[in-house]
Image: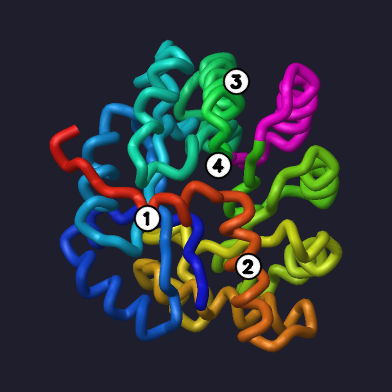
Amino acid sequence: MLVDSHCHLDYPGLAERIPELLERARAAGVTRMVTISTLLRKAAVYRAIAEAHPEVSFTVGTHPHQAGEEPDVPAADIVALSHHPRCVGIGEAGLDHHYDNAPRDVQERVFRTHIAAARESGLPLVIHAREADADVERILTEEMARGAFRAVLHCFTAGRRLAEVGVELGLFVSFSGIVTFRRSEELRAIAAALPRERLLVETDAPFLAPEPHRGRPNEPSYVAETARVLARTLDMTPDAFARLTTANFHRLFDKAARADAAPIDTAS
């Protein structure tokens, strides 16, 4: 049993094929997935996907690429959107200094607002960090000092220091198909050095398909390939690694189990 802790089922190429993708995911042993928000104004889209498919939960948030489109949404509004029983997290939010699609000061402001929403809601924050290690570390350290919150560094490709700081602050670290690439020796070494109880796996579908699917659109079933590589890296059996990361997922995204038992009011 595996969990794809981060995918984007609303994206073109996936949205039209969700029943087919879920069938293949089940065949690969992937029993749950979280479709991740990139724009708060699309919250109804994510909610509808989760309401239609019991295997799927969702988050609410603004990606740093889109921070300029939603620069001033109050934390209270994000928290209000998170009250749906199938919403299990906040984000993804953070910093992306590779593309800089939004001004850096706006990215930081939106990131801090999402941290406040995670703190207030009690839900974990999904953090996007690309080529911004020092600033992400600074913000996380400052904000954690103001009040604890839970979070995961998603699709981790940063340096060892950010992983270590994240763990010290209580964060989880999630690895995508990038960890399967031939030249990702350092990334695998970072994964092997982290506490096992902080590890998650994801696809980030439709992006970053793992070997041997590299170059194709990614999908939730492919998280099994990433899990196999990480299991080998950690000298674990695939089944043991699946049990580990599934348990880790439910410790972080603890609302997911409650969501299974909650009735869904599709009129809300």
Tell me the amino acid under the disc marked 1. Answer: Ala
C-alpha separation, residue under disc 3 versus residue under disc 1: 32 Å
Tell me the amino acid under the disc marked 4. Answer: Val
Q: Is mark 4 on a helix, strand or loop?
A: strand
Q: Residues within 10 Å of mark 2 (few under 14, many from 20)?
A: many
Per the image, the residue denoted by label 2 is 245
Which residue is painted at 81% across and 69% down in the image?
192
* Magenta part of the chain: 126-149
Q: What element carries label 1?
A: helix
C-alpha separation, residue under disc 2 versus residue under disc 1: 22 Å
Q: Residues within 10 Å of mark 1 (few under 14, many from 20)?
A: few
User: Which sits earlier in the primary sequence, circle 4 or circle 3?
Assistant: 3
**What is the x, y in percent for residue 225?**
53, 80
In the depicted structure, whether residue 155 falls above or below residue 237 = above
**What is the x, y in percent for residue 201?**
58, 64
Tell me the amino acid under the disc marked 3. Answer: Arg
Per the image, the residue denoted by label 1 is 261
Tell me the amino acid under the disc marked 2. Answer: Thr
Per the image, the residue denoted by label 3 is 112
Q: Closer to the camera: disc 3 or disc 1?
A: 1
Q: Specify whether 100 is left or right of 71.
A: right
Which residue is painted at 17% across and 42% down in the image?
266
C-alpha separation, residue under disc 4 versus residue under disc 3: 12 Å
Q: How crowded is mark 3: few (under 14 residues within 10 Å), some or many (20 or more)?
A: some
